[in-house]
Image: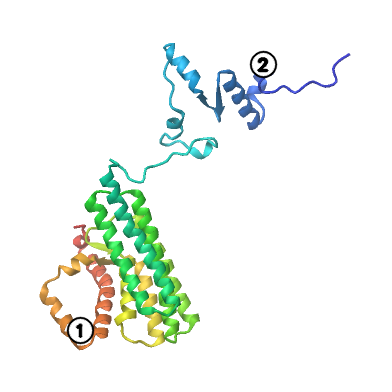
Amino acid sequence: MARVWRRRRSIDTPRPAGRRWARLRRGGSRATQVLVRVARGRRRGGSSVAGEQVLYPERDRRLSGRGARPLADPIAVLAAPGRDLAAHETSVPVSIPLLPGDRTPARRLKFAVVNGFTVGSLLLGMAAIFLAINAEFKFAALALLGCVVCDGLDGGLARRFSVASPFGAQMDSLADLSAFGVATAVVMYQWLTAQGVSAVAAAPACASVVVCAAIRLARFNVSPKNGRYFCGVPTTMTCAVLALHVLVGPTLPAPAEIVAVAALAVAMVTSFPYAKLARVVRLPLWLWVFPAICAMISVPGTFAAVVAGYVVSGPLVWLLHRRRPTALVAG
């Protein structure tokens, strides 16, 4: 009497011989092929994942003692360049050190100091938000200026101490978005509404500061750097201008306030070249005489004129570049 049913063959049982096994290898679903590979790996003394054989340490030592070919490290195999780690569900995550190079106590201390300024910028941005919510606009503006100072110190110290790292660059970018994007927008929104500007009009202008700052920082991270010019107004400059406007800026009508904030936001994402602050400071001394005299007469008016001149300088340099293509060569 023939058997009505047969026990299902598990992956640990000996494989069938003949044409049936060959047909099973050639055909079947993807899951069947994976099970076949796992079974083959177990019979050989290891485990197979998606066709990648990984032997156990005991077998490695036994084979190496017999003069066999040394086996590759499974973690190094999975972390090799060009290998898709997402395809290996059981792969070990590879940890990348935050500080490249020699990790001596002195370099670690310098690395901590540099990133401490980055964290300080982030905390000052949060403090500016809390102060603006409590209507302390002067102190909120000072906190934003502190963010600008910390942002300048962390990059300069990282290059001076030779502790620049990809982690520090990413951390700095996230802190800049929080301080110069979110915190600046919140402070300006609270200040504009306190000045009598409609919340319906102030919200889109301040939201554009966050959006344009994110676009500006993302573009800056992936674009080649020019030694003489910025591509668009930097986020630090926008934050400093808006903070100084709260402190010493002129009193403008509500529509002019909205247009000024929106114009600075759009200037961050334009392609116009703007001179770096180091080049502006190195201008001839006689060029600073007229602004100094104007500042003695009216600080708010001089501040507005200097900011407007800097914003307009981008399109002017761009027009000069169209006539002389060598004008924007990196210095």
Residue 127 visible here: yes
**Residue occupying the point 42% across, 34% down:** 80
Res 185 quadrant in image: bottom left
Residue 269 visible here: no
Residue ID for mark 1:
295
- Pick the front one: 142 or 14: 142
Q: Residues within 10 Å of mark 2 (few under 14, many from 20)?
A: few
Percent of width and height locating residue 169: 34, 53
Give the amino acid type for the residue marked by disc 2 in the picture.
Pro
Is there CB contact under 8 Å for labels 1 and 2? no
Looking at the rendered structure, the secondary structure element under dot 1 is helix
Q: Is residue 133 left or right of residue 280?
A: right
Residue ID for mark 2:
14
**Residue occupying the point 37% across, 43% down:** 97
Res 323 quadrant in image: bottom left
Q: How crowded is mark 1: few (under 14 residues within 10 Å), some or many (20 or more)?
A: some
Percent of width and height locating residue 233: 31, 68
Mark 1 vs mark 2, CA separation in Å: 93 Å
